[in-house]
Image (cartoon, rainbow, N blue to C red):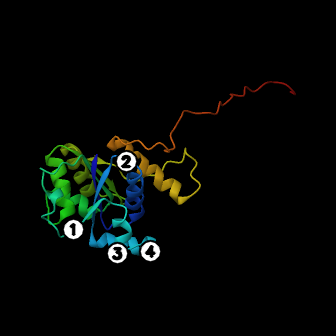
Amino acid sequence: MRVIVGISGASGSIYGFRLLQKLGAEPGVETHLILSRAAEKTAFLEMGKIAADFKLLANFSYPEEDIGARVASGSAQIDAMVVAPCSIHTMSSIATGITSNLLTRAADVTLKERRRLILMVRETPFHLGHLRNMAALAEMGAIIAPPIPAFYTKPATVDDIVDHSVDRVMDLMGLPPHDAARWEGSRTVCERKIPTNEGK
């Protein structure tokens, strides 16, 4: 399976980093990284990591200016693309077909070829324009998957919270991780206490 991982400049570069780590541990998965310049800055500010740290985790990497890279063409055999995290700027460009760099071009190609595009949109709150762009993307076939934490897994660390969102994205790609924390149904039986008249 060939997967493009796009990382934009939104806060949450750890999502892209962790996704690359987990995809790299999956047998038969080939990763193609597009790291934006803004993402490089965010990653250094948030994680103290540089572009080389991300590139080491990918099978192939391309600068966002390389609009002639192979992933810019629909003839490239790619199965899915994830943008993690996806900034509002990147999301809006994809929604309106503005393909001024390789990241948005690759996403546009993914949509036109009817392949799976997953956007981990990282913003809050959303205004109406954001929501309309999300609706347009959903109509085009994209999956909008904001990294919203779940707490039924009883996360103890930031890594636990990050992994939950990344695992869900991998599920959406058809690559369910073996170590994902999953809901197995309520294990607690709540007993209804019926009041009595005793002691009165």
Establish if 49 lies above or below 193.
Answer: below
Q: Kindly identify which residue carries mark 3.
A: 41
> In this figure, which residue is indicated by the disc labeled 4?
48
Of mark 1 and mark 3, the one earlier in the sequence is 3
**Which one is earlier in the sequence, the residue at label 3 or at label 4?**
3
What amino acid does circle 2 point to? Val
Residue 35 sits above or below residue 142 on the image: below
Q: Say which label, 3 or 2, has the lower sequence index.
A: 3
Q: Is residue 8 above or below residue 116?
A: below
The residue where tag 2 is placed is 169
Q: Disc 2 or 1, which lies upstream in sequence?
A: 1
| Camera-nearest label, 1 or 3 | 1
117 horizontally vs 101: left or right: right
Viewer-nearest residue: 162 or 27: 27
CA gap, disc 4 to disc 1? 21 Å
Which type of secondary structure does the marked residue at label 4 adopt? loop
Query: Which SS class for mark 2?
Result: helix
N-term-proximal mark, 2 vs 4: 4
Q: Quadrant of the C terminus?
A: top right
* SS at badge 1: loop
Query: In this rendering, does residue 93 appear at all?
Result: no
Q: Secondary structure at mark 3?
A: helix
Local packing at callout 1 (Cα closer than 10 Å; few below 14, some 14-19, many 20+) is many
Residue at 44 percent across and 74 percent down: it is 48
- Which residue sits at x=58%, y=33%? 186
Amino acid found under the numbered disc labelled 1: Glu
Residue 175 lies, in percent from the top left, at 37, 42
Binning the other alpha carbons within 10 Å of mark 4 as few (below 14), some (14 to 19) or many (20 upward) gives few
Q: Where residue 95 sits in the image (x, y, percent)?
A: 19, 55
Going 50% across and 45% down the picture, which residue do you hit? 179
Q: Give the Cα separation between the discs numbered 3 and 4.
A: 9 Å
Q: Which residue is mark 1?
A: 64
